[in-house]
Image (cartoon, rainbow, N blue to C red):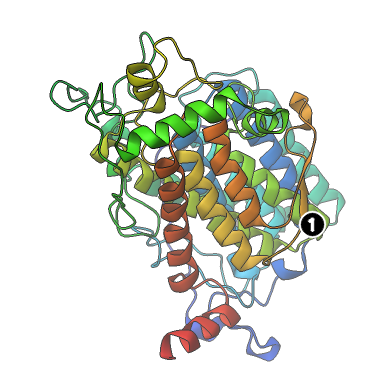
Amino acid sequence: MKFKHLLVVMLAGVAVFSSSCGDKSKGGANPLYNSASKPSSEESAQFLLEWWDAMFQYVGTERLSPPDAARMYAYIAIGLYEAQIGGAPNHYTLEGQLNGLENLPRPDAGKVYDWQTCVTETMYLVQDGMLARYFTAGVGTLNDLHDSQIERRKEAGVTDEVLQRSMDYGEELANAILEWSEADGYVETRYKQYKAPSREGHPALWEPTDFNQVALEPFWGDHRPFFVKDGAQCDIDKAPAYNGIGDTTGELYKQAYKVWEVDRTLTEEQRTIAQYWADDPSETSTPPGHWMEILGNFVKSEDMKLDRAAELYALTAAAMNDACITVWHTKYRVNLVRPKTVIRENIEPTWEPYVETPPFAGYTSGHSGFSGAAATIMTGLIGDNLAFVDSSHVNIGLLPREFKSFQAAADEAAYSRMYGGIHFDCDILDGVEQGRCVGDYYLKNLKTHADRSKESATKKEK
């Protein structure tokens, strides 16, 4: 790519807004509001869809794992949100709220900025830094997208002076976001060694189910979350006991038998659901990306303004990342055996699931955690019982699916893993519960919009 921004170059004299800078004449509650510029609340968010589509293609091409993709999406989305916050009269910065996010550069309060250009530059450079370790054929596409969006701003009448000022600010902000990302524990866990505990004397413990499997991201639960306190905050442990070969009366055996029976009588609809939500890294944007694509459909259909879309992307992506951290914390703490192992030991020695079993413990389900968090955020910010059509996978030959609500889609996504033969009921239900725990914590405690902040304060008082 054009740049590899791995170090932050902080420019002296960057002005930080005070509470007196808000546009009180317009009723804006945001103390960082820049009244000299056109509000981001009046700018279309449609240009964001091009960036997310490019990211989804990139993730699929590079076969990023779900945790890796969730982390990248979240940093890009938070950069996007902060890049336009100066133009959002009723939204608040995430600085000082998200863990470790401090000392962000701010636009000059008295000068004009083009928020679309700020966002374009920030997203471009954050993804550039996050993906610097990859070498892909898609680099040119991202470079061309950046250049075309900047050119469109010129055609829209943005002066060279404002354009350059906005690009400079986007670069400063991207550098700060990338520096922040370097302290989340990701780099350190690239070099840690993991040895799975032995099942000898502990038959309930997970072991690889296929030849040459290596445990995926065993230390992901130790990463710094964005908003929850740590990976243990939404931890859960209601997994049934399993005593190994011959244990045909315990609860986990019963759940394994259910998985086996469902697989034996799998309907075409269940097969379709298993395929639809599989979200394999090799051909899709992964489970968290699937939810970001669903969100994008609403950004498009509702013709959202930039401030609202930015908030939705930031909170949805960050909550899914935090759900991933808490689910992975539970996975490697509990280390519960997979259905394939229990079924082969007690029901059918050569049994294979419909979907390949991933290389990590089953309790709790990652798909369930991602879906529970995303559906909770989207229900809170877009609406409950809102019917929609998801056409995210038309490009891989899967027909669109209709849902009555975000929660209904989350439940289907969660149980798709049983249809795939890779998760017990406990994995699924407790994973959804963890995701919702994260999403609820965001909605109740993160201050992003003046009106919702007042509502949350009123509910707490009651």
The part of the image, by quadrant, that contains residue 254 is top left
In percent of the image, x 65 and y 56: which residue is there?
406
Whether residue 166 is visible, yes or no, is: no
Density class for disc 1 (Cα within 10 Å; few <14, some 14-19, many ≥20) is some
In the picture, measured across the screen, residue 10 lies left or right of residue 29, that is left
Task: State the residue at coordinates (62%, 74%).
Answer: 34
* Numbered marks: total: 1
Q: Three-letter amino acid code at disc 1? A: Val
Q: Name the residue tied to disc 1.
A: 158
Q: What element carries label 1?
A: loop
Image coordinates of residue 270 in percent, x first then y, are 66, 32
Kindly indicate the quadrant of the structure image that contains residue 157. Answer: bottom right
Of 307 and 227, nearer the camera is 227
Q: Which of 17 and 455 is in front in this view?
A: 455
Residue 78 located left or right of residue 378: left
Q: Position of 208 compared to 316: left or right?
A: left
Question: Does the rendering let one see residue 45?
Answer: yes
Rendered-image quadrant of the N terminus = top right
What is the x, y in percent for residue 66? 49, 34
Percent position of residue 40, x then y: 70, 66
Residue at image position (58%, 19%) is 136
